[in-house]
């Protein structure tokens, strides 16, 4: 399942926005990753020069691939890790795709009698409010979460905030930051032991690159 | 949830069809006889136990236990592992038996799972417990036998990583004297395998730079025997040093067993601190994303059942091992078909019994007349099954 070739490292890469930043980081670390794949529609990219194979996955699925060991390592946002709660090693903060998870509401928000929270991250939201000792009804939405307080589906939302531009344009305010989000390097439990040298070397390389970026 | 459709079963449980059962039984048999060769005797305990005894004592978290009520309203659990039930038996039915006790098992165990996760709610474990011996020899015996079991099961490429909870406990105790909360939260992060959060917390804690670096370098302490020597230089704490010495001795015994090729020391490998008290280990197979074997020393469990004793053991995840063994055509079974009609019945069934006594697998089928394809072409398949021999006792008598 981990691929028969022990020399090839299988990497679950998030498709889209984060891929470009992640592959650039790999290039900065000296790995021969061509730029030609930045906009590819291919799902599996073989990189014999780097002795790697990229699996282009939907970001939210990356921890699943890694937990099951169909890929050795993966790159994924902390938001997904918090929501999915998969049993994987979280090895390195890559510092890319930086944003935050926040509680958002209309400016004139008042504590509702039956508080409702709309979010794409029901586990994160439930855990956060439970920790605060508040019982809220969590409503799972799949996109345009900002709509919920504007049209009265929920009085607050829990969502990712990058620049805050969308919030501003829709007249919403950020109430509290729950946690900071960056992309992380994660590894499968077995691969981390069976391919430890490969993974540790990559980890060190990336860490040096990150240190020199600051 | 809507009413289940007739083919559905609860999430996380499986049917095992004949081909898979054959493999499962073969693995079970090979592993148990391997353990028997080391003097371990098999034990069977009930599927259900009391929540307040075995349920509470087991290492499985409360949320993952299957709980049910009996007709008196007492909470029961479906066993989540075999270690706690064996501790109960050792402390009660076997309480007059002298230590050390060597017990093995093959059994289904139960864990609740979250929906859609695709994990298993019922699976098989083949394992053993060595109770009443705290020596490194005992730990090494268990590790060596885990290796032998994997080999017996037919797993070819695998590695065993050994760690020791005492090392980390000691190092943290020394670095963060009397700051128990900080120690606990660092351990919790390691247990969650969240190295990012571990390092982030180190950066926040008030520590000298040397200690901070030392604690962060813990994450790299894995390799061969040399790791033990290196680890001795890391800490002067007694608990940590004792742990490393114990590991060194285990290593020496494993060397004598000649199995060190399969073993690596990994001081970052830690099990549940509230449960394991000493050496812990995990086995990884090259083509499987999850560990295939895990075990370690748990010296506090038996005291919960009133017979304090050191103990060590492991469980092989038999169901996962099956995934590793391909569909290699095992020896084709010799199956004989005997077809008979009313006239030929006596002779046919006597012949069937005689053949079975010789160890053949014989299927009999009564017909009113000889099926066309068997009569004509010498075709050996009948009702969807191919046979190695067909005998008929129809009409004019025996025909092969």
Image (cartoon, coloured by chain):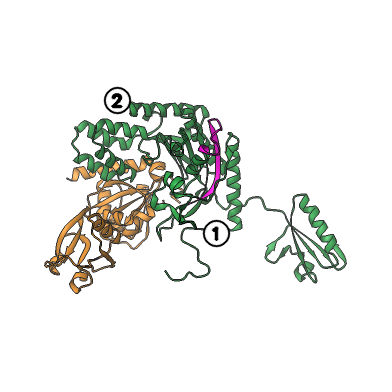
Chain colours: A orange, B green
Left or right: residue B139 compared with residue A105 = right
Tag 2 residue:
B236
Dot 1: element: loop
Image quarter hosting the N terminus of chain B? bottom left
Residue under disc 1 on the same chain as residue under disc 2:
yes
Q: Residues within 10 Å of mark 1 (few under 14, many from 20)?
A: few
Q: Which is nearer the N-term, disc 1 or disc 2?
A: 1
| Magenta residue check for B288 | no
Q: Residue at x 35, y 54 (%)?
A: A63
Instruction: Give percent across and percent down for residue B329.
Output: 62, 52
Q: Are marks 1 and 2 in contact (CB under 8 Å)?
A: no
User: Considering depth in this image, is A164 or B163 the residue closer to the camera?
Assistant: B163
Q: Residue furthest right?
A: B396
Image quarter hosting the C terminus of chain B? bottom right
Q: Residue at x 46, y 61 (%)?
A: B11
Instruction: Give percent across and percent down for residue A100.
Output: 20, 56
Q: CA distance from mark 1 to mark 2?
A: 54 Å
Instruction: Give percent across and percent down for residue B373.
Output: 75, 69
Q: Residue furthest bottom?
A: A151
Q: The magenta stretch spans which residues?
A: B90-110
Instruction: Give percent across and percent down for residue B393.
Output: 83, 64
User: Considering depth in this image, is B48 or B138 the residue closer to the camera?
Assistant: B48
Q: Quadrant of residue B242?
A: top left
Q: Residues within 10 Å of mark 2 (few under 14, many from 20)?
A: few
Q: Residue at x 77, y 71 (%)?
A: B372
Tag 1 residue:
B15
Residue A38 marker: none
Letter of the chain that mark 2 sits on in the rendering: B
Letter of the chain that mark 1 sits on in the rendering: B
Q: Quadrant of residue B269?
A: top left
Note whether residue B161 is visible.
no
């Amino acid at each position: 399942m981990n691929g028969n070739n022990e020399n090839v490292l299988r990497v679950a890469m998030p498709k889209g926005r984060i891929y470009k930043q992640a592959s650039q980081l790999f290039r900065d670390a000296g790995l021969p990753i061509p730029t030609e794949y930045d906009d590819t529609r291919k799902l599996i990219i073989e990189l014999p020069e780097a002795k790697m194979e990229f699996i282009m996955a939907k970001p939210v699925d990356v921890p699943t691939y890694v937990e099951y060991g169909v890929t050795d390592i993966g790159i994924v946002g902390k938001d997904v890790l918090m929501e999915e709660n998969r049993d994987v090693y979280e090895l390195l903060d890559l510092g890319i795709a930086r944003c935050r998870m926040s509680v958002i509401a209309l400016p004139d928000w008042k504590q509702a009698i039956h508080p409702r929270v709309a979010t794409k991250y029901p586990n994160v939201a439930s855990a956060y409010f439970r920790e605060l000792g508040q019982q809220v009804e969590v409503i799972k939405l799949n996109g345009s979460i900002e709509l919920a307080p504007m049209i009265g589906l929920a009085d607050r939302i829990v969502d990712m905030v990058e620049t805050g531009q969308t919030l501003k344009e829709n007249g919403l305010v950020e109430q509290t930051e729950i946690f900071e989000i960056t992309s992380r390097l994660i590894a499968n439990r077995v691969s981390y032991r069976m391919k430890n040298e490969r993974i540790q070397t990559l980890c060190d390389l990336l860490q040096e690159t990150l240190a020199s970026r600051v | 949830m809507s009413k289940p459709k007739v083919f559905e079963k609860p999430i996380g449980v499986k049917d095992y069809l004949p081909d898979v059962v054959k493999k499962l039984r073969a693995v079970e048999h090979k592993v148990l006889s391997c353990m028997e060769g080391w003097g371990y005797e098999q034990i069977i305990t009930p599927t259900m136990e009391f929540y307040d005894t075995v349920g509470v004592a087991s290492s499985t978290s409360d949320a993952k236990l299957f709980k049910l009520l009996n007709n008196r309203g007492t909470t029961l659990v479906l066993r989540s592992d075999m270690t706690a039930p064996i501790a109960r038996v050792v402390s009660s039915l076997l309480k007059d038996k002298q230590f050390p006790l060597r017990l093995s098992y093959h059994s289904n165990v139960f864990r609740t799972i979250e929906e859609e996760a695709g994990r298993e709610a019922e699976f098989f474990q083949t394992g053993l417990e060595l109770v009443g011996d705290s020596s490194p020899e005992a730990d090494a015996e268990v590790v060596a036998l885990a290796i032998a079991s994997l080999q017996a099961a037919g797993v070819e490429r695998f590695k065993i990583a050994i760690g020791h909870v005492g090392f980390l406990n000691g190092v943290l105790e020394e670095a963060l004297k009397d700051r128990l909360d900080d120690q606990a939260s660092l351990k919790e992060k390691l247990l969650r395998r969240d190295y990012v959060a571990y390092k982030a917390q180190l950066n926040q804690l008030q520590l000298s730079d040397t200690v901070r670096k030392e604690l962060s370098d813990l994450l790299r302490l894995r390799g061969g025997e040399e790791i033990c020597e290196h680890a001795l230089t890391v800490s002067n704490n007694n608990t940590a040093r004792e742990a490393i010495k114990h590991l060194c001795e285990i290593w020496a015994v494993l060397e004598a067993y000649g199995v060190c090729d399969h073993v690596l020391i990994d001081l970052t490998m830690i099990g549940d601190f509230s449960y394991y008290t000493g050496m812990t280990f995990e086995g990884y197979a090259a083509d499987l994303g999850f560990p295939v074997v895990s075990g370690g020393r748990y010296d506090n469990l038996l005291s919960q059942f009133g017979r304090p004793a050191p103990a060590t053991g492991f469980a092989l995840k038999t169901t996962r091992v099956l995934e590793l063994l391909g569909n290699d055509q095992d020896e084709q079974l010799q199956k004989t078909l005997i077809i008979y009609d009313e006239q030929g019945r006596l002779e046919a069934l006597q012949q069937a019994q005689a053949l079975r006594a010789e160890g053949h697998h014989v299927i009999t089928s009564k017909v009113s007349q000889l099926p066309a394809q068997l009569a004509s072409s010498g075709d050996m398949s009948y009702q969807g099954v191919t046979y190695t021999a067909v005998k008929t006792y129809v009409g004019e008598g025996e025909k092969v």
